[in-house]
Image (spheres, rainbow, N blue to C red):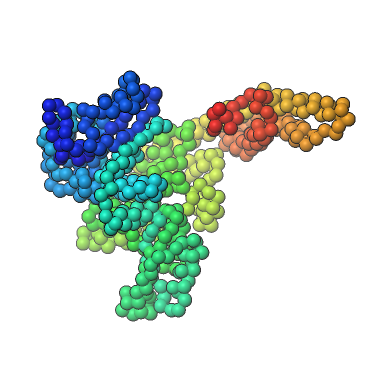
Amino acid sequence: MEFGVGAIVDGKVTGITKFGAFVSLPDGKSGLVHISEIAYSYVNEVSDHLREGQEVKVKVIGVEPSGAASMKASVEAGHVVTLDRVTTIADGVAVKTPGDQVFPYIQRNVDELLTIDDDELVDAFLDVMEKHKMVVENAGLLTIAALKHLDCGDCNVVSVLSGGNMDVITISSLVQHGLINRGRIFTFSVQLPDRPGELLRIAGLVAGLNGNIIKLDHNQFVNINRQAGVELKVTMEAFGLSHKAEILDALRQAAGEEIGEDHQSHSLNIGVSTSPELMADDSDRNRTSPFAFTGNRFEFRALGSGMPASASQTALNTMMADSLDYAATRLEKLCGGDPEKLHVAVTALIQEIMEEHSAVIFNGDGYSEIWHQEAERRGLPNYRTTPEALLVYTSPEVIDLYGRYKVLSRQELKARQEIYIEQYCKSIRAEANLAARMGRTIIYPAGLRFQQELLRACLDMRALNREPDTVLLDDVDATLRSLREALEHLERLMDTHYDDLVLEAHHYCTAIIPTMNMIRSLADHLETVVPEDLWPLPSYQEMLFVK
């Protein structure tokens, strides 16, 4: 928003004023419109052009860069505020002090103020250039970047772009930063033995992973003794953050040395001045990790849809308390009461923890079978089923952890374990009952009706002395027979009970669930061959592509 420009004359705004408007259209659709050189007093007139004769409600959302949010600060303070400094790549809106005439107008008519970081503007610039082949200056991209902050749902969104006042050097810088943020360009460095073939080995590894080297710096003078190693700094292109991580992982394993990335990043401010600098991770792990580190925090994403977060939160908080207790005790021992040794002690502690627990770090797809295999190779426990995992609830290590911090006693843990196992059994039994009933009363009869139609068609063909094609009939007949047998087997399994809850849960896990999966597979196959007019349930096609 260029709030510093403009004046109010006879209740109307004149001059140039940039702001964003969220427009709700009569048919329920909506969009974010970036209005440039249009005064708010003419918004209703513009709306009339959108839908003649219909009421159009307008919500105006102001957008400022976070490094120059003078209007937001002024609105929050209730009076015009002058910022000490402004830092933003959106130089067209880098205003320290809002105009005193425009400010009351903004107070009255702007519904909400959003602030946008420079990194978001860089991403918006790259999106617009790459996807729409347009060059828009940073100030004109504020509303594009703001779209990610608004819950627009499935509405139609329109952003009017204006302003392309950018030189080639600025464009080049923005593209470079955008590619770095997305992992498509990065730099790494590694120390290698000073012997022939080492450079070729690294280049071969990169090429084998479809990476593209665009710059090399081979420094033989990083060490006084060249035999101790030389530094290789490589700038290269990748397809994105996951490809970048794959390349770095492979290089770390092959080089025998820790590879350090040398890209524009930012450090974490953890509030401890004596701790070493920690660089923020700029990768997006939300889709590939059940416990993702997303820049400055961990996100636990492994909860099932029907699970409350309380038990997991209790476990995570207790584990955190134990870790902090361990770290504080260890630091006290390493320092020996001397505060001057704290920095060295923190470094040593981090190194110890990484050496002891680095096996849990995996930068690949945490939901893939590859991670199961890798975890087994690293000697990590892997509980694939709920009954297996619930048995750990009363393991000696867990009882000791909860007991030391007086969170839960042995009896309380045992009670929770029994409740969770019982809930598991009841849930699976309810699902099995439903599967059996749907199979008996809905799916199997639908298949029988189709089988009868096929039989009549075959008889009609033979009445005309023609040999019918029975491939589909044979397939449906075999599927129905297998479905009937699976349903009978499921019903027999459900009649089997155990006095021991653990054995009962094991029975549901290893016998009933596989049988339900078999029924599901047979039903899915029938859905692909039974005509729509005979299939009583919504098909995947109908749910995904509603007619």
Taking the spot 53% from the left edge, 57% from the top edge, the residue there is 377
* Residue 266 appears in the figure: yes
**Quadrant including the N terminus:** top left
Going by the picture, which residue comes out furthest to the right?
465
Q: Residue at x 38, y 67 (%)?
A: 215
Q: Nearer the viewer, residue 80 or 505?
A: 80
User: Where residue 179 sits in the image (x, y, percent)?
Assistant: 37, 55
Instruction: Answer whether residue 331 is visible to the viewer in this image.
Output: no
Residue 425 lies, in percent from the top left, at 56, 31
* Above/below status of 460 relative to 503: above
Closer to the camera, 410 or 535? 535
Q: Is residue 490 left or right of residue 242?
A: right
Which of the 4 image quarters holds residue 244? bottom left
Choose top left, top right, bottom left or bottom right for residue 20: top left
Instruction: Residue 161: give x, y in percent of width and height.
Output: 31, 41
Q: What is the x, y in percent for residue 294?
A: 37, 47
What residue is drawn where x is 34% and y is 74%? Answer: 219
- 180 over 136 or under it: above or below: below
Residue 69: image quadrant is: top left
User: In the rendered picture of this protein, how many numbered marks are placed on residues?
Assistant: 0
Front-most of residues 263 and 252: 263
For the point 51% across and 42% down, the residue is: 389
Residue 74 relative to residue 314: left or right: left
| Above or below, comparing residue 426 to residue 209 in the picture | above
With respect to residue 348, does 129 lie above or below? above
Q: Is residue 74 left or right of residue 492?
A: left
* Quadrant into which the C terminus falls: top right
